[in-house]
Amino acid sequence: MLNLHDALKQTNIDPHLKEVLDTIAASCKSIGGKLRGGALSGVYGSESSENVQGEVQKKLDVVANALLKHALLSNRHVAGVASEEEDDVISGGDEGRYLVTFDPLDGSSNIDINVSVGTIFSILPTSTPGSQVTMDDFLQPGHQQVAAGYVLYGPAITLVLTTGNGVDVYALDYDGDFYQTHAQIKVPEATQEFAINMSNQRFWEPAMQNYVADLLQGEEGPIGKRFNMRWVASMVAEVHRILTRGGIFMYPYDKREPDKPGKLRLMYEGNPMSFLIEQAGGACSTTRMSIMDVVPEQIHQRVPVVLGSKEEVERVNAYHQQATS
Ligand code: AHM
Ligand code: MG
């Protein structure tokens, strides 16, 4: 079977980018090791600290962030990193040509209950090689990404990767290597499964309320088919399900905190997941525009996220267009 290293060798991507991807895979293996030990690894529970977004950090958020940060900053091809758990961007080596953004442990509320979590990463080119990076270097729209992926720590540890030429899936074997299990996966165009945190329903915009109300009417409603619902509260697990069997995932704008356009972050969640989903033939949207066209103004910026099977994402967009026309 093809391992990650050999699979990357077969592509014509920059060898320096391959080294960055190898570093990410190795760090995620270590994070997976901590998770496998559960409470025995001493990584359950919360820190007394909050991250820059005012969220209480879990112990594993901090451990995973440190692992990835130190490994990436030791790689000479990395010009800088930005993390959901860091206040500011951090400069790497002067000769580096790649910027890496990551959510070291996504789905943190699942850590202590032993439910799937993940690491999400996005790689951007730097336009100013040879100099110290600043936040401005990172503020590129998602369509500039050269690679993106995630590692899902579920019953199996699974790496899902795109370098702009489709999406491949790898599983971590007992020998400590990632082996390719699926090549060029595709999101089915139509679906009958949706994922949204229904407890926020009363805070959504009317168009989203209408769309979900119509979904719930099943075959008797205007959409004309019965839907099933899933909510893992771990975006990596939801996206993995959608890449595997289709579906639609929504974390829309809601008015709980009116100054924040949604819960999820553009640079660590919205963009990398959109790159993967679009490379697998699915669609992504803020409900108003393509996520990867959003020009970031802040490194920790939030974005409404709708992604998955094309037919359903287009339907959500149409509900929002109708509401504004
Ligand atoms: P996190 O990065 O702080 O873990 O938050 C992101 C997670 C996503 O994985 C998931 O889709 C969402 O938050 C779940 O939110 P909720 O708590 O509303 O269910
Ligand atoms: Mg996250």
Image: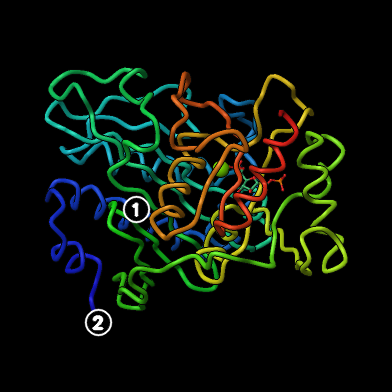
In the foreground, 228 or 289: 289
Name the residue furthest front.
Answer: 325
* Badge 1 or badge 2: first in the primary sequence: 2
Secondary structure, mark 2, is: loop
- Quadrant where the image shows the C terminus: top right
- Tell me where residue 173 appears, x and y as whole percent: 35, 76
272 vs 142: above or below: below
Mark 1 neighbour class, 10 Å CA radius: few under 14, some 14 to 19, many 20 or more: many
Q: Amino acid at mark 1?
A: Ser
- Residue 1 - label: 2
Residue at image point 27% right, 43% down: 146
Q: Quadrant of the N terminus?
A: bottom left
| Rendered position, 63 above or below 79 | below
Q: Residue at 58% across / 52% down in the picture?
A: 235
> Which residue is farthest bottom?
1
- Residue highlighted by disc 1: 27
Judged left or right of residue 3, residue 186 is right
The x, y position of residue 152, in whole percent, is: 49, 61
Q: Looking at the rendering, which quadrant does residue 155 occupy?
A: bottom right
Q: Quadrant of residue 150?
A: bottom left
- Specify the amino acid type for callout 2: Met
Mark on residue 60? none
Viewer-proximal residue among 179 and 280: 280
Please state which of residues 24 and 128 is positioned toward the viewer in this rendering.
128
Residue 232 % position (x, y): 68, 59
